[in-house]
Image: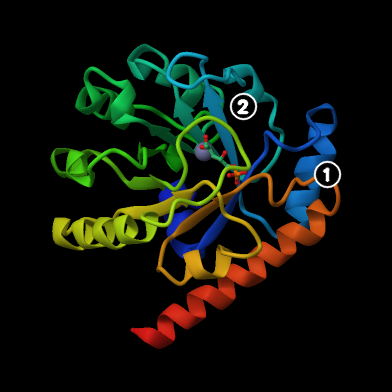
């Protein structure tokens, strides 16, 4: 039987919750992933920071490789000049790789290069190419890239760390990104990342996005499984209210 592409899997399960794993107990990675699987989460989000583009330094390809799970691996590269590094992340098993134009001298070239990459676990599954945008970056940056990407990630916080506050102008930016996608005539998935908690996740889902990242609000050191289930339900609820509105 043909393997569905990562893009198809995401589109079919849209809207999905992509849970940031870095605030989990990393010494118990296996059981933290099992907890997400049990809760019904489909995607795990990994924030890769290099100490240059971002003040913090986090993890790299060996960590992605160590994620033994059927969850899709959503790898958010907040690193300078990813051109010669993206291949390592694909080889480590990334299903989605998101880069930042603010960190690239040749963003179009990086995306072209990513088009040729194979999914390390299932070559037929492909790698979804994402472009992430900081809150201060004009969305127009995306226009010349729309033919070379499958995913847009609107950041609702500045790259740096978990637990920051959702920046309200994100909502207008999401609307604008949706219009750009509609105008492109291409199928492109849209995500939001940063500052998403129990209190605002349904509202974000009601914007009609495909992927919602939430990290510290799930792995809060207390009730991760209950938090994950809550987020999944709230996203369904929010998406339903969006369907009723349109
Ligand atoms: C921002 C990262 C985010 C974010 C998620 O630098 O890209 O993925 O930290 O964490 P929470 O959900 O805690 O904002
Ligand atoms: Zn992220």
Q: Nearer the viewer, residue 117 or 132?
A: 132
Residue 15 coordinates in the image, percent (x, y):
50, 64
Residue located at (42% from left, 15% from top): 85
Looking at the picture, how far across and down is residue 176, in whole percent?
Answer: 24, 59
* Secondary-structure class at tag 2: helix
Q: Which mark is residue 79?
A: none
Can residue 65 be seen? yes
Say whether residue 56 is left or right of residue 226.
left
Q: Is residue 153 above or below residue 29?
A: below
Q: Identify which residue is drawn at 67% across, 38% down.
A: 21
Q: Left or right: where does residue 31 sit relative to residue 184?
A: right
Q: Which mark is residue 221?
A: 1
Judged left or right of residue 22, residue 175 is left
Snapshot quadrant of residue 86: top left
Spot occupied by residue 235 in the image (x, y as percentages of width and height): 57, 68
Picture layout, residue 78 above or below residue 232: above
Ligand 1 is found in the corner quadrant, namely top right
Q: Are marks 2 and 1 in contact (CB under 8 Å)?
A: no
Q: Which residue is mark 2?
A: 64
Residue 238: x and y in percent read 53, 74
For residue 232, which quarter of the picture? bottom right
135, 146: nearer the viewer: 135
Q: Quadrant of the C terminus?
A: bottom left
The residue carrying pointer 2 sits among few (fewer than 14), some (14 to 19) or many (20 or more) residues within 10 Å by Cα, namely many
């Amino acid at each position: 039987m043909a393997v569905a592409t990562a893009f198809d899997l995401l589109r079919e399960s849209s809207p999905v919750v992509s849970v940031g794993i870095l605030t989990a107990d990393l010494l118990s990675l296996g059981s933290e992933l099992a907890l997400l699987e049990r809760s019904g989460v489909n995607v795990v989000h990994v924030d890769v920071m290099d100490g240059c583009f971002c003040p913090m330094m986090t993890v790299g390809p060996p960590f992605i490789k160590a994620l033994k799970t059927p969850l899709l691996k959503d790898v958010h590269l907040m690193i300078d000049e990813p051109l010669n590094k993206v291949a390592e992340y694909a080889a480590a098993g990334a299903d989605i790789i998101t880069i930042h134009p603010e960190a690239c001298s040749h963003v179009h070239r990086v995306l072209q290069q990513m088009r040729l990459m194979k999914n390390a676990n299932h070559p037929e599954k492909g790698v979804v190419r994402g472009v992430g945008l900081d809150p201060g970056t004009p969305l127009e940056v995306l226009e010349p890239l729309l033919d070379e990407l499958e995913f847009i990630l609107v950041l609702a916080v500045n790259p740096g760390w978990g637990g920051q506050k959702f920046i309200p102008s994100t909502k207008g930016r999401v609307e604008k990104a949706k219009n750009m996608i509609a105008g492109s005539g291409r199928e492109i998935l849209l995500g939001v990342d940063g500052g998403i908690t129990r209190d605002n996740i349904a509202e974000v889902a009601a914007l009609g996005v495909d992927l919602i990242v939430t990290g510290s609000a799930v792995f809060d050191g207390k009730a991760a499984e209950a938090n994950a289930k809550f987020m999944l339900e709230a996203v369904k609820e929010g998406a339903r209210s969006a369907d009723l509105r349109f």
